[in-house]
Image (cartoon, rainbow, N blue to C red):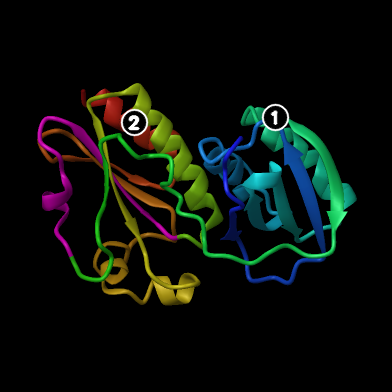
Amino acid sequence: MGGIAAISLTLLLSGAAPAEHLRVWIHDLDDCCAPKAVAALGALPSVSAVSLELADGALCLSLASPAAEALPLITQALAAAQQPVLRSAPAADCPAAEPVDPWAGAAGLDFAKIPSDKPFSMKSAVVPDKATIVDFGAAWCAPCHAVAAALTEGLRAEPRLAVRAVLLEGADATASFATPVAKQHLSAAPGIPWMFVYSPRGRLLYAGEDPAKALAAARGAL
């Protein structure tokens, strides 16, 4: 972690007021593994926000449930993500910052963002000779971070896979689903994350929220 400047990034996970704050130190936390740690915590209902303090190798968590109940689940989730917890301590507060980009770890892969400020055709998003997953999410959406992490791993494992992501604008579900792109493509979706999987010939193979099913559908077309 030498030479890394102090960075604090906050993942907004819910609008509920957190009951407690907890600082958790992780072994060798850096800007490469941090998105995986954030994604792991994003799936926990007991965690309402995560701030990354990379210079200290720590995560500052705002909790939606008592720390005594949340900590075992936090430790288990981070261990499963190969981010072992070294120690933890109560915190008076957590720093506020900009929402974390769910796709921070996808640089260098066959990944691109589709602008969310205007409508687009799905046909234009399909990559020739590859299976394409078009993912709809938002920075405020906790499960969207977990999906982004899973699809990023899929991109690393399968060179014939492409992902095109739409990060909806807005600070909450109401604002995001009012955007033109959401009205265009998500009218039948119950929420986000939501993925569309296309074959190399542009045939729709899957529409849903499960990244494992999306990746299986994509691999099945290759």
Local crowd size for mark 2, using a 10 Å CA cut-off: few (<14), some (14–19), many (≥20) = some
Q: Which stretch is magenta?
A: 120-138
Per the image, is 136 magenta?
A: yes
- 171 or 205, nearer to the observer: 171
What residue appears at the point 30 percent right and 35 percent down from the top-left corner?
Answer: 108
SS for tag 1? helix
- Asked whether the beta carbons under mark 1 and mark 2 sit within 8 Å of each other, the answer is no
Side of 19 where 157 appears, left or right: left
Residue on which disc 2 sits = 155
Q: Position of residue 195 (x, y in %)?
A: 34, 48
What residue appears at the point 68 percent right and 35 percent down from the top-left corner?
Answer: 78
Q: Quadrant of the C terminus?
A: top left
Q: Is there any visible trace of residue 210 in the rendered image?
A: no
**In the displayed structure, would residue 203 be above or below residue 84?**
below
What residue appears at the point 52 percent right and 64 percent down from the top-left corner?
Answer: 98
SS for tag 2? helix
Tell me, for residue 176, which label it has, or none. none
Q: Check disc 2 and give the amino acid type.
A: Leu
What residue appears at the point 43 percent right and 46 percent down from the top-left corner?
Answer: 104
Q: Position of residue 39 (x, y in %)?
A: 56, 44
Residue on which disc 1 sits = 79
Q: Position of residue 131 (x, y in %)?
A: 21, 33
Of the residues under marks 1 and 2, which one precedes in the sequence?
Answer: 1
Q: Is there any visible trace of residue 50 in the rendered image?
A: yes
Per the image, is 14 magenta?
A: no
Q: Check disc 1 and give the amino acid type.
A: Ala
Q: CA distance from mark 1 to mark 2?
A: 23 Å
Local crowd size for mark 1, using a 10 Å CA cut-off: few (<14), some (14–19), many (≥20) = some
Q: Position of residue 46 (x, y in %)?
A: 74, 54
Side of 68 where 7 appears, left or right: left
